[in-house]
């Protein structure tokens, strides 16, 4: 039988440890990457599996800055399921429940603190509570910093606060998560007026009722009670999204600022001209003053709160972990004297390392702007490189900029491609390792097989009706693509592998996959990038710019007509490879944040297969139904 519950969210408090932030924003409305914490809690409760628990109504108590929460509620898509319980004075954790007795008294209910982010399985907690016939079931975990709830060997509450246990006592201390399941009869242990729910727990336990616990040790859990813990929660959300920055589209002033590290700018944020931000959260309507330098802090409308750097970063014995890409290689920022370097850890048998070393020397010789290499340890599979900062083109584009600024940046990036496709390619014999790596039929077929195996079957769970006919089309596509003039290509020339250094100067990374292939493959990777979609008019102007620069710099080998013909086939290849990678990384590597790029990648591939549907009908039919 599915048990009906209600839910009650405690959201009335002052958030004193978060002042002055909470003088402007009530703690439950603090944004996590653009979404108020309260909204995330409500969404989580609404999304609970209805075959396990049914929660139709959610109560919320209010006091501090209640008007802001009322306004949020009115605009919420869940408004019809929310019931508000304003308090003229703070009633605390017990009094808040007693004040809502008319709402809670007809069913069991879940209570959720309004300042908690977790992945605790609330449905499992509710089912356990019902099965054990507890009056109260506290979700608990081992969290030494907060372990002050003493339980016996059966998980029943003994006391709160004093954690000393007599010699031989079968007791242990554990932490309350701020989430619990209650039977309606618990309300009888609460007095009228302000009170603590803890006192009611102990009163009920003394009366012989079961105050049990449900152990969720190992869950993800953050109590947003201080500036540092708020930053930690935001940074965790940022990492879970695979991002280094979250910048609201309404942000003003991006044109003349420097940003780096992990950056969050919430709605209404303003960046003054010449300001510099590294490891910062700019709160709603926060303002960075012109010319000021901000580092490791929270920026509000009229205040700045310094926060220890460790809240923003993952620090290890090798240095600060950086990067969230798809590679198994790991990168760390490490201090060497007064400068920082990037330590790349590849593993003992990574063949990419030796190529990376050879390509670095070759590319730097011919003015391809790759990072300088300072040391290599082939035995342990590691190397030290110049630190190019944290700002990729992908992140740079998140900050709203004018069309002219964006086009100028892309032109500088295309200038790198021209140098790679022309002068560096003319001297590829200087790097035999690269000269011998041909983007041949076998490799092109590997890409299309990768697409069918990892994306079509692996992610979309679609079986191919006529695999033989599709394979024949892929063979023809590989033969056609492989027949075009080959030059050096980066092979993954997309916005996340282009770093924007000081002054907006682009540099490139992750080039160990470079091969000899049609140059259009790199152009397709950049201008039809699912990570950073471009408008058709801008893309068209950039294509004209690239072809013009190639006509100036290349020898007679470059023919615009051949390039135009090759571009469509390279786009087909590139987008099948990219979708295959998204499938592989999200399913086999559990990097589910790549799924957010699938829609754009698939849209581009559908656009391309529509153009070649007469030539490749089986591919067109497959893609049309994905």
Image (cartoon, rainbow, N blue to C red):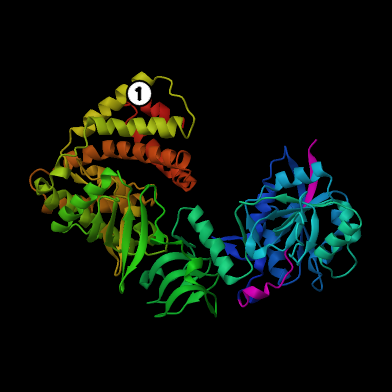
Q: Residues within 10 Å of mark 1 (few under 14, many from 20)?
A: many
> Which x, y percent locates residue 620?
38, 29
Q: Is residue 331 left or right of residue 126?
A: left
Quarter of the image where the N terminus is located = top right
Extreme-front residue of the structure: 167
Image vertical order of residue 493 relative to residue 518, above or below: below
Q: Is residue 115 magenta?
A: no
Marker count (numbered): 1
Does any portion of residue 411 appear in the rendered image?
Answer: no
Q: Nearer the viewer, residue 452 or 607?
A: 452
Image vertical order of residue 403 relative to residue 209, above or below: below
> Which x, y percent locates residue 574?
31, 40
Q: Is residue 178 left or right of residue 415?
A: right
**Numbered disc 1: secondary structure:** helix
> Which x, y percent locates residue 557?
10, 43
Does any portion of residue 466 appear in the rendered image?
Answer: yes
Q: Residue at (49%, 30%) from the top-left corner?
A: 461
| Residue that mark 1 sits on | 470
Magenta segment boundaries in residue numbering: 1-20
Please tell me in which quadrant of the rendered image residue 481 appears.
Answer: top left
Q: Residue at (47%, 70%) from the top-left corner?
A: 309
Q: Is residue 143 left or right of residue 192?
A: left
Please tell me in which quadrant of the rendered image residue 4 appears.
Answer: top right
Q: Is residue 2 magenta?
A: yes
Q: Is residue 520 left or right of residue 3?
A: left
Q: Nearer the viewer, residue 556 or 11?
A: 11
């Amino acid at each position: 039988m599915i048990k009906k519950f209600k839910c009650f969210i405690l959201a009335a408090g002052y958030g004193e440890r978060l002042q002055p932030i909470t003088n402007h924003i009530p703690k439950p409305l603090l944004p996590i990457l653009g979404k108020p914490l309260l909204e995330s809690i409500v969404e989580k409760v609404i999304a609970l599996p209805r075959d396990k628990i049914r929660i139709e109504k959610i109560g919320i108590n209010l006091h501090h800055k209640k008007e802001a929460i009322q306004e949020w509620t009115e605009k919420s898509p869940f408004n019809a399921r929310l019931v508000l319980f304003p308090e003229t004075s703070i009633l605390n954790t017990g009094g808040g429940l007693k004040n809502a007795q008319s709402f809670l008294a007809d069913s069991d209910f879940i209570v959720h603190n309004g300042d908690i982010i977790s992945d605790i399985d609330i449905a499992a907690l509710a089912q356990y509570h019902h099965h054990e016939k507890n009056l109260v079931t506290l979700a608990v975990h081992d969290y030494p910093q907060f372990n002050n709830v003493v339980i016996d060997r059966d998980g029943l509450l003994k006391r709160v606060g004093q954690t000393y246990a007599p010699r031989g006592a079968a007791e242990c201390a554990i932490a309350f998560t701020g989430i619990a399941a209650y039977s309606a009869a618990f309300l009888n242990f609460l007095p009228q007026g302000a009170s603590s729910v803890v006192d009611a727990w102990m009163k009920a336990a003394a009366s012989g009722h079961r105050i049990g616990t449900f152990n969720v040790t190992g869950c993800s859990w953050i109590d947003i009670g201080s500036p540092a813990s708020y930053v930690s929660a935001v940074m965790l959300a940022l990492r879970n999204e695979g991002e280094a920055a979250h910048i609201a589209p309404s942000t003003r002033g991006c044109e003349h600022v420097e940003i780096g590290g992990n950056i969050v700018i919430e709605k209404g944020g303003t960046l003054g001209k010449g300001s510099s931000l590294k490891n910062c959260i700019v709160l709603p309507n926060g303002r960075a003053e012109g010319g000021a330098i901000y580092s490791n802090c929270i920026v509000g409308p009229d205040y700045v709160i310094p926060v220890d750097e460790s809240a923003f970063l993952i620090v290890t014995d090798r240095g600060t972990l950086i990067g969230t890409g798809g590679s198994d290689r790991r990168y760390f920022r490490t201090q060497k004297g007064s400068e920082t370097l990037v330590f790349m850890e590849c593993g003992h048998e990574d063949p990419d390392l030796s190529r990376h070393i050879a390509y670095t020397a070759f590319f730097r010789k011919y003015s391809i702007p790759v990072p300088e290499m300072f040391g290599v340890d082939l035995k342990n599979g590691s190397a030290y490189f110049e630190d190019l900062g944290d700002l990729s083109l992908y992140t740079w584009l998140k900050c709203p900029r004018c069309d002219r600024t964006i086009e100028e940046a892309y032109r500088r990036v295309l200038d790198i491609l021209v140098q790679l496709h022309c002068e560096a390619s003319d001297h590829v014999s200087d790097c035999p390792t690269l000269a011998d790596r041909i983007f041949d039929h076998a490799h092109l077929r590997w890409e299309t097989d990768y697409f069918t195996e990892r994306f079509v079957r692996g992610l979309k769970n679609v079986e191919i009706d006529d695999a033989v006919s599709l394979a024949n089309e892929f063979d023809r596509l590989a033969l056609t693509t492989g027949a075009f003039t080959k030059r050096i290509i980066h092979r993954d020339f997309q916005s996340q592998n282009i770093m924007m250094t000081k002054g907006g100067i682009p540099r490139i990374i992750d080039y160990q996959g470079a091969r000899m292939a049609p140059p259009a493959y790199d152009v397709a990777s950049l201008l039809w990038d699912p990570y950073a979609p471009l408008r058709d008019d801008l893309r068209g102007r950039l294509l004209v710019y690239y072809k013009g620069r190639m006509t100036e710099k290349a020898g007679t080998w470059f023919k615009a007509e051949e390039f135009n013909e090759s571009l469509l086939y390279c786009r087909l290849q590139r987008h099948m490879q990219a979708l295959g990678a998204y499938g592989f990384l999200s399913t086999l590597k559990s990097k589910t944040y790549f799924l957010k790029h699938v829609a754009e990648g698939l849209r581009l591939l559908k656009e391309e297969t529509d153009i070649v549907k007469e030539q490749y009908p089986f591919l067109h039919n497959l893609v049309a139904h994905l």
